[in-house]
Amino acid sequence: MELLYVICVGVLTFSGIFLCLRARTFPVVVGLTMLGYAVNMFLFSSGRLNLEGAAILGMADKYADPLPQALVLTAIVIGFAMIAFVVILSMRARADLGSDLVDGSEPPDTRKLVKSKRGDA
């Protein structure tokens, strides 16, 4: 189970970093969300992965630590609020700038297309 968990955290981290390096705002937002989930899973695993018992009941060596679970729950709520804020911010930037690129510039292909439609060549 630990190997599957580590692979999932690694894939989420890799995908999040890959998407954060894209030029458009939507993939960056999705990448930040994936990175947030990867960090939450990593924090959750620090409280021991245990399938055999409840959170605190039983022997002290067999229970999962409830503190990382509480921290992950708080991080999920804060992460959801931050992603909602970033989506609204990116929608506003798209409306004001007319482009959804991260640096606010137009892609090179769009400039050529606009010039050819105007007849400027």
Image (cartoon, grey):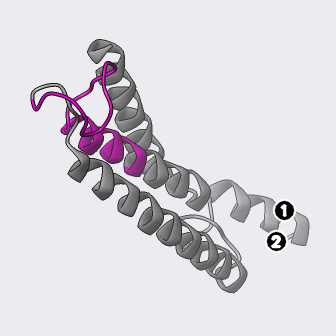
Expressed as whole percent of the image width and height from the top left, the position of residue 45 reads 25, 34
Residue occupied by mark 2:
120
- Residue nearer the viewer, 36 or 102: 36
Confirm whether residue 23 shows in the render: no
Task: State which quadrant residue 57 falls in.
Answer: top left
**Left-right relation of 36 to 58:** right
Give SS at disc 1.
helix
Q: Are marks 2 and 1 in contact (CB under 8 Å)?
A: yes
The magenta segment: 36-60
- Mark 2: which amino acid? Asp
Confirm whether residue 14 shows in the render: yes
**Placement of the C terminus among the 4 image quadrants:** bottom right
Q: Is residue 62 above or below residue 77?
A: above
Expressed as whole percent of the image width and height from the top left, the position of residue 76 reads 44, 58
Expressed as whole percent of the image width and height from the top left, the position of residue 63 reads 20, 32
Residue occupied by mark 1:
116
